[in-house]
Image: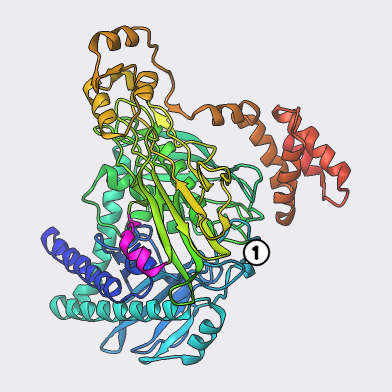
Amino acid sequence: MFDRTNLQVLANHARAAAENMAHTLHRTAHSAFVKETQDFTVMLMDRSGATFAVPMELGATWYPGLSYRRAIAMVDDYRPGDVAFTNDPYSGYVATHAPDTHLWKPVFVDGEIVAWTGGHIHNTDMGGAVPASLSRALTEIHQEGIRFPPMKLVKEGVFDEMILRIMSTNVRKPDLNIGDIKALVGALNTGERKIQAMVRKFGKVGFIEGVAALLDHAEAQARDVLRSMPDGTWEFADYADEDSVEANPCRLKLKLTIKGEEAVLDFTGSDPQLGSSLNVPSGGDPRHTMLLVGVYYVLYTLNPKLLLNTGLTRPFTCITPQGSVLNPVHPAAVGMRSLTCSRLRSVVFGAFSQAVPERLPAAPAGNNCIVNVMTTDERTSRSVIAAVNPVVGGGGAMPHRDGTNGSGADAAYLKNTPIEITETETPVEFVKYGLAKDSGGAGRWRGGLATEMAFRVFAPDSRITARNRDRSFFRPWGVLGGKAAGLSDMVVNPGTERERRLGNIDTAVLQPGDVLEIRSAGGGGRGDPHEREPWQVAEDVRRGYLSAAAAERDYGVVIRGGEADEQATEQLRARHRPSAGHFHFGPERDGYEAQWTPATYDRLHAILDALPIHWRFFAKTEIFRRMKGRSGPEGVLAAFDAVCERFPELPRPRPVREAAE
């Protein structure tokens, strides 16, 4: 039996082992997206495939609750030296889009598997319809690149060259892919050695029992956090700007119920699976890590001493109806699931913010735009495809401080690549990279500022993909009197006669001399902005975070000569009336929800849920098209009647109208 001291010793060993794995991968990876941006994970897993240790210093932070159980079971006859892999989102539900290649390796002691090492790397490209394989415009999984169901990549220490050959034939930059995969295999080998060392220290039985105790301890910590919250039910919804190219908003809805030391997250009422690549392939797993990423952030905010492992997921149950955007069926496209996951985290944050408003921040930017360039390097006449930089927005304002600038909480693990490295490896020239003025939500505590970046290309037909473009219409929300943040934007040739605003479009073709400028959203504000100390507002103006006009408009602080004019400020603030309500969403969402009220959405989903899955997105799109001049639940029903009249093939069983009524 492990006492608290010995358990902490084991936890430290496991964490150190995971950090060693991460350093191995980080130092030997080939692509900038892995070695600089650090879009990778590594982990140690118990015999069932449940994660019990992850690094904290390197890599992505989405996967401390990931279980490889279903994928492990799809491969037979593991032997020492084997490494299995998959990148198929519908096989085992470990990989969640094709560029994420997951590998796992059994660790044997005395002929018995005692643990697994595992992890993923985000390949720069896996083939498919567009460079980097990802675009919102894609409509089925087959367009998103080559997929490998769970199979052995390494057999008793020897790579399967046929698999590598097939991959090389189908991807745009095979050297990067294979180099990163081999780096990950090296990391798994490092983890294997570290586990075997732990077994020697604690004994085989002691190690196995200790790993189980680590999972149990994390579960107990999560239950302690839930017990610190009031029992109750809270509902929240948020929107991705578009459910497909230039189309309608995608709504995610959550009903959070906390009872004692357990919680249910019911996502019923979220939109049906989409005819675009924004779907999240959870496979109906009630504790799928993608559904619970926002929960990890909430738990860790409330208890920074948490052990990060799969035990955290045990007190939570997620409900995701089949055929919804959070539980799609094959062959729905899923490549841009990270955009939807960003909005999913916002939904989770919004629900928990109502449960414990005094302890949680406003909304982070909720968009982590990953920019990839495919162009020709005129210096070498070779084609290049590379990740340029993540454009990550501001963090939401905290209960005790301003939001973090340019590094929004739930996407802070994505590291920026130094400009010098990018310009050396990719033929582009940066003309701007910094923080965007006036982009943080106003508040007693200001939301974090957005990031803005602009670069010039030099070769004809340079193709840009900027995945996860969002928050150009629905703002990150403020709380408790704080204001919503500034919106994101993407512009070609800004400030010239050839300026072209792209909105949420995530692909572009640029010609020599063209400049692409991308700005993220900011973080939401917290608390009444008129309660912010005038000297703090003046300091924001001096630093270039805030314009003098915004200081006066949003904070009631008059700036003269770089300082706050106390008398003028006092007079201006005397006329201020604080806003009511927990959230501030901004005029765009307020205007949208004047038509699309909760009751209107309830009627829409009653109709859609009664239809076969393959008709739902089509029916939603056609109903939206006919809602001009209509409103309310009866307007939705009238629009659906018009759709049925236009498309008599549309199934209309009796339960449709009965459910709607």
Question: Quadrant where the C terminus lies?
Answer: top right
Which segment did they paint magenta?
413-426
Q: Is residue 149 above or below residue 614?
A: below
Left or right of 627? Residue 126 is left
- Closest to the observer, 11 or 97: 97
Q: Kindly state the secondary structure of the residue where label 1 is placed.
A: loop
Q: Which amino acid lies under the numbered mark 1 shown in the image of this protein?
A: Glu
Left or right of 5? Residue 605 is right
Q: Is residue 1 visible?
A: no
- Closest to the observer, 458 or 492: 458
Q: Is residue 312 above or below residue 246?
A: below
Residue 637 in which image quadrant: top right
Residue visible at 65% across and 64% down?
A: 140
* Residue linked to disc 1: 140
User: How many other residues sit within 10 Å of disc 1, few (<14), some (14-19) or many (≥20)?
Assistant: some
- Closest to the observer, 370 or 5: 370
Residue 107 in which image quadrant: bottom left
Q: Position of residue 651 (x, y in %)?
A: 82, 50
Left or right of 400? Residue 245 is right
Q: Is residue 405 above or below residue 375?
A: above
Q: Position of residue 237 (x, y in %)?
A: 52, 37
Q: Is residue 149 visible?
A: yes
Magenta includes 422?
yes
Question: Quadrant where the N terminus lies?
Answer: bottom left
Q: Position of residue 589 (x, y in %)?
A: 55, 31
Left or right of 276? Residue 311 is left
